Image: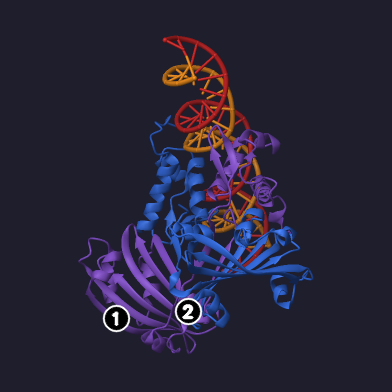
Chain colours: A blue, B purple, C red, D orange
Amino acid sequence: MSTKAATQTSLHQKILGDLESQILSGVLPPGARIATELELATAYDCSRMTVSKVLTKLAGAGLIERRRKAGTFVRRPQSQAAVLEIHDIRAEVLALGQPYRFELIERKGRRANRGDREFLGTEASGRVLDVSGRHFAGRKVFCLEERVINLTAVPDAETVNFAEISPGRWLLDTVPWTVAEHRICAMAADRAAARDLAIPAGSPCLLIERRTWRNEVPITHVRLLYPGDAHQLVAHFTPSGR
Amino acid sequence: MSTKAATQTSLHQKILGDLESQILSGVLPPGARIATELELATAYDCSRMTVSKVLTKLAGAGLIERRRKAGTFVRRPQSQAAVLEIHDIRAEVLALGQPYRFELIERKGRRANRGDREFLGTEASGRVLDVSGRHFAGRKVFCLEERVINLTAVPDAETVNFAEISPGRWLLDTVPWTVAEHRICAMAADRAAARDLAIPAGSPCLLIERRTWRNEVPITHVRLLYPGDAHQLVAHFTPSGR
DNA sequence: GGTCATATTATGTATAGTCATAATGAGGGC
DNA sequence: GCCCTCATTATGACTATACATAATATGACC
C-alpha cells in the first residue's frame, strides 16, 4: 500500500504495543475476540504478514490464543509464570561488592549408589564425583554446596582442581546444560550444615536443589544451602517476553 | 507420533531444531559465527524470510545474537534463567488431590502508613486494605497469607466478601497484573505465624513475597508463608522457549 | 430431523522480491 | 598518518501472493 514513512518505531512495534496495552488495560478483556488478521491489516494499512508476525509473537508470549477459523482470543492469565534468574554464585557475591572465595571441603570419586540412581536413570552403574565446598562473601559463608557429578558424562571432571575453580563455574563453562530442574524449599540446618555455615543448628535455611541434563544425559545434581534470611531469590516478570 | 499431522514437520521447525541442537551440542560454540541468512536459505533451499524468522525466534530466546553487517553469533550462556511457575494456591492444593478451603482471619481498611509507602510510591496518602487468611489443604494449613491491597487502584476490593473467594483469586480475575516481583527466602516462624500455621515456633518456613503492578500502578503486596519442608517450588527450564 | 459432504473462513507456512538501516572496510584528500 | 566519504554487506521491516490446514457453517440427502 503506502510506501510507509519509516519513523523511529516500526509498524511491527506499534501494532505489538497497541494490542499489548489494550489487553493489559482491559479494553480487550480475557476471552474477547481480536479482529482478524485481515481486519487488522486494513486498519493499520499494512499487509497480513506483518500483522501475522505480531500475533504469532503475542501468542508465543501467551497473551493470546489463536484458533483456525475461529479467530484470535485474549487468553485468561492462568498459571502465573515468573522468570527466575539463577546467577552464578561468584557473580552474585561480587555484585554485592564483597570479595569472593570458594573453599573445597571434600572431593571423592565413587561408584553410583542407589540414591544417585534415581537421578542418573537406569544405566546407572557408572562412577560419580562427590564435591562439597563453601562459597564465601568476605568472611561470611554465603552458601554451602554439595554436588554429585556424573563422571560417565563428564570424565574430565576427575582431573580438575576444584580448589581453584568452583565446580559450578567449571561445569557451566565446560558442559552447558540444556535442561535444568530446580526445587526450592526451606529447611532447618542440621548439625553438620550448621557447623559449615557457622550458624546455630536448627536455623532456617533456603535449600535450592538443581539437577541439570545435557541432551537427556544427566550431568550434575547440586544442593545449595543458604543461611536463612541472608539470601533472597528475586524473580521478575513482565508478560509477553520483554 | 505417527499421526497424520506429524508426517511433515515444517521447514521452520526443522531449521530451528537443527540450529538449536548444533548450538547446544557445541558444534557451534559460543562466539561462533552462524552462516548468513542467505547461505542458510540456499542450504535449506528455502527463502530468506523463512530463515530470518527462525533466527529472529532464536534471538528472542537469547541463544544467538544478531548484528547487522557483522552477522549472527552464538551467545555465551550467561545468566541462567529458569521459568518459575507460581500457581494459584487453590489449583495447587486441588492438584494434590486434597480439598481446598480459605479461611479469613482478618480484614480491615486503613490509611497507608510509612511501611506501605515504599511500595505504593510517592502518591501514597490513599487507603489500603489489610487482608490475612489461611489456605487449607484438607485439615492441614497449607499456607498463611498476609496481604495489602491498594484501594486507590482497586476500590472494588472494599466491598468483596473475601470469606467466599480468596483475595488472590479475586484479584487475579479482576485486575490482572502486568509486572510482578517475587522475593523468596527462608525464615523461622515467629510466635504468631507458628500459631496460625500450627507448627512449633522457630520452625523453618518458606516466605514468598510478591508485589504486583498493573501499568505502573501498585496493586497488591502479599506475603505467603509456607510451613518449611511441606512445600516446594519447582522451576523448570529449557532454552529457547520451547 | 439427523448425518455426511462441501463451502467458507481464519490462521499457518512459505515465496520472492523491495527498500531501510547499521556496521564495516576501502579509498581519497589533506 | 588521519579523517572523511562511499560502497559493500548482512540484518530488519515490509509487501503481495500462494497454497495448506483446521474448524465451523451450510445444505443436500436419506
Amino acid carrying label 2: it is Pro
Pick whichever, B176 or A42, lies toward us. B176
Q: Residue furthest front?
A: A139
Residue at position x 51%, y 67% in the image = B85
| Percent position of residue A64, x then y | 47, 56
Pick whichever, A13 or A51, lies toward us. A13
Amino acid carrying label 1: it is Arg
Distance, label 2 to label 1, CA atoms, is 29 Å
Residue at position x 36%, y 59% in the image = A26
Report the chain holding disc 2.
Answer: A
Report the chain holding disc 1.
Answer: B
Residue B168 sits above or below residue B215 on the image: below
Pick whichever, B182 or B187, lies toward us. B187
Which class describes the residues within 10 Å of circle 2: few (<14), some (14-19), or many (20+)? many
| Residue A172, image quadrant | bottom right
| Percent position of residue A18, x then y | 38, 48
List the residue tagged with mark 2. Answer: A204
List the residue tagged with mark 1. Answer: B107
| Percent position of residue B74, x then y | 60, 44
Which class describes the residues within 10 Å of circle 1: few (<14), some (14-19), or many (20+)? some
Residue at position x 75%, y 72% in the image = A112
